[in-house]
Amino acid sequence: MSHQHEASGSDDDMESEDRAMDALAAAISESEGAQFVEPEVTREQQVIAEVARRRDAAETKRKSDAIFDRFDADGDGYLNFDELRALGLATGGELPHPAFVAICEELGAAPHRGVTKSLLLTMYTDAGLGDAHRDYNLIFS
């Protein structure tokens, strides 16, 4: 009989150990979801992200400026309808005159003059009217 009691005690110990292991596993899972990150590490990650963002912004500006220079055929510092339309055609798009006027109005440009170099960059960035990286690759490749 005492032998049976030992087996029963051993089973109880195993169940208790299993419950403890389950509790430990649950605690580890919860803590992994809310890991503590040192403030220095967070700051370093923020700095790295900002450097990457600025590098991308500089690259976007460089490509936008190169595209502008390529299509400003008359060298007046504006992309008029014909020049912006040529840019559209070179990158697989079409630009009807009413769309050109609407773009100019949205950007605050005079349609009779066209889009400046800085406004072309705005089209690519803030206005979301194209992708300078894609267009650059299509034009210069």
Image: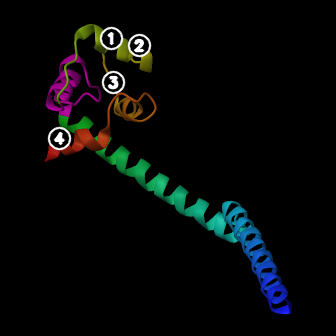
Which residue is at a point 43% across and 27% down the rendered structure image?
Answer: 127
Q: Is residue 49 above or below residue 61?
A: below
Distance between the Cα atoms at labels 3 and 4? 21 Å
Rendering coords of residue 86 (x, y %): 16, 25
Residue 5 within the magenta-colored segment of the rendering: no
Asked if marks 1 and 2 touch (Cβ < 8 Å), the reply is yes
Asked if marks 3 and 4 touch (Cβ < 8 Å), the reply is no
Residue type indicated by callout 4: Leu
Question: Of tags 4 and 1, which is closer to the observer?
Answer: 4
Looking at the rendered structure, the secondary structure element under dot 4 is helix
Question: Of tags 4 and 2, which is closer to the observer?
Answer: 4
Q: Which residue is mark 4?
A: 138
Distance between the Cα atoms at labels 4 and 2? 27 Å
Rendering coords of residue 123 (x, y %): 38, 29
Q: Which residue is mark 1?
A: 101
Which residue is at a point 66% across and 64% down the rendered structure image?
Answer: 43
Residue type indicated by callout 2: Glu
Residue type indicated by callout 1: Val
Q: Which residues are magenta?
A: 71-91
- Residue 108 seen in this snapshot: no
Along the viewing direction, whichever of 124 and 114 lies nearer the viewer = 124
Q: Which residue is mark 3?
A: 115
Asked if marks 4 and 1 touch (Cβ < 8 Å), the reply is no
Along the viewing direction, whichever of 36 and 19 lies nearer the viewer = 19
Q: Which mark is residue 105?
A: 2
Looking at the rendered structure, the secondary structure element under dot 2 is helix
Task: Please tell me which of labels 4 and 1 falls first in the chain.
Answer: 1
Question: Of tags 3 and 4, which is closer to the observer?
Answer: 4
Question: Of tags 2 and 3, which is closer to the observer?
Answer: 2
Distance between the Cα atoms at labels 4 and 1? 25 Å
Question: Of tags 1 and 3, which is closer to the observer?
Answer: 1
Distance between the Cα atoms at labels 2 and 3? 10 Å
